[in-house]
């Protein structure tokens, strides 16, 4: 069976490509924000969570908080790292913003999510090797994230 390429075939193929592009555009508009490479590092007093956050929206999006979905009594803060008086210091911030169509790298010595609690609670938090959390965005939506242990220790201490 031969496929005969006629102007009509090209028109159908063109229409299908356009339909696929519209679907992709619609998907990213709905998805809005996507997270990649979520990982964590542990220290005795805190766990640092890092990831790449991609903003597919045409407007700025800010992460205004995070909720840990694990059976552990911990507190979560958004941190920036600043260089002050010859040392890196972590600073609690209200939000971490991603520019329109941009991405934000949460990393050691940069912006990150910090989970703090007593040693026992942190052990509970990481016992199955995955930390499940929801990022809370400024439009009220949530982004589910599963963070795995970072392969290379970032030497991320707190305080
Ligand atoms: Cu921190």
Image (tube, rainbow, N blue to C red):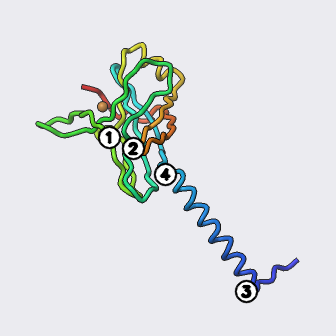
Mark 3 against mark 2, which lies toward the viewer? 2
Q: CA distance from mark 3 to mark 2?
A: 49 Å
Q: CA distance from mark 3 to mark 4?
A: 37 Å
For marks 1 and 2, the one nearer the N-term is: 1
What residue does disc 1 label? Answer: 95
As drawn, the label of residue 32 is: 4
Circles 3, 4 touching at the beta carbon (< 8 Å): no
Image height of 115 relative to 54, above or below: above
Furthest-top residue in this view: 120
Q: CA distance from mark 1 to mark 4?
A: 17 Å
Image quarter where the N terminus lies is: bottom right
Name which quarter of the figure residue 89 lies in: top left
Decide which of 159, 65 is in the foreground and name it: 65
Q: Position of residue 37 (x, y in %)?
A: 47, 43
Q: Position of residue 2 (x, y in %)?
A: 85, 79
For marks 3 and 2, the one nearer the N-term is: 3
Q: Is 8 situated left or right of 123 in this image? A: right
Circles 2, 4 touching at the beta carbon (< 8 Å): no
Circles 3, 1 touching at the beta carbon (< 8 Å): no
What residue does disc 3 label? Answer: 7
Circles 1, 2 touching at the beta carbon (< 8 Å): yes
For disc 3, the neighbor class at 10 Å (few under 14, some 14 to 19, many from 20) is: few
Q: Is mark 2 within 8 Å of ligand 1?
A: no
Furthest-right residue in this view: 1
């Amino acid at each position: 069976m031969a496929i005969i390429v006629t102007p009509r075939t090209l028109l159908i193929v063109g229409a299908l490509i356009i339909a696929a592009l519209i679907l992709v555009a619609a998907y990213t508009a709905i998805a809005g924000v996507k997270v990649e490479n979520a990982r964590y590092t542990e220290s005795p007093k805190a766990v640092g969570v890092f990831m790449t956050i991609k903003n597919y929206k045409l407007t700025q999006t800010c992460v205004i908080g995070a909720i840990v979905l694990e059976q552990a009594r911990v507190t979560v803060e958004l941190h920036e790292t600043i260089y002050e008086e010859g040392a890196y210091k972590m600073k609690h911030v209200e939000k971490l913003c991603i520019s329109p169509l941009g991405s934000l790298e949460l990393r050691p010595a940069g912006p990150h999510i910090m989970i703090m609690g007593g040693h026992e609670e942190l052990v509970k938090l990481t016992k199955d090797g995955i930390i499940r959390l929801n990022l809370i965005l400024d439009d009220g939506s949530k982004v589910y994230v599963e963070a795995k242990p970072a392969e290379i220790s970032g030497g991320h201490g707190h305080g």
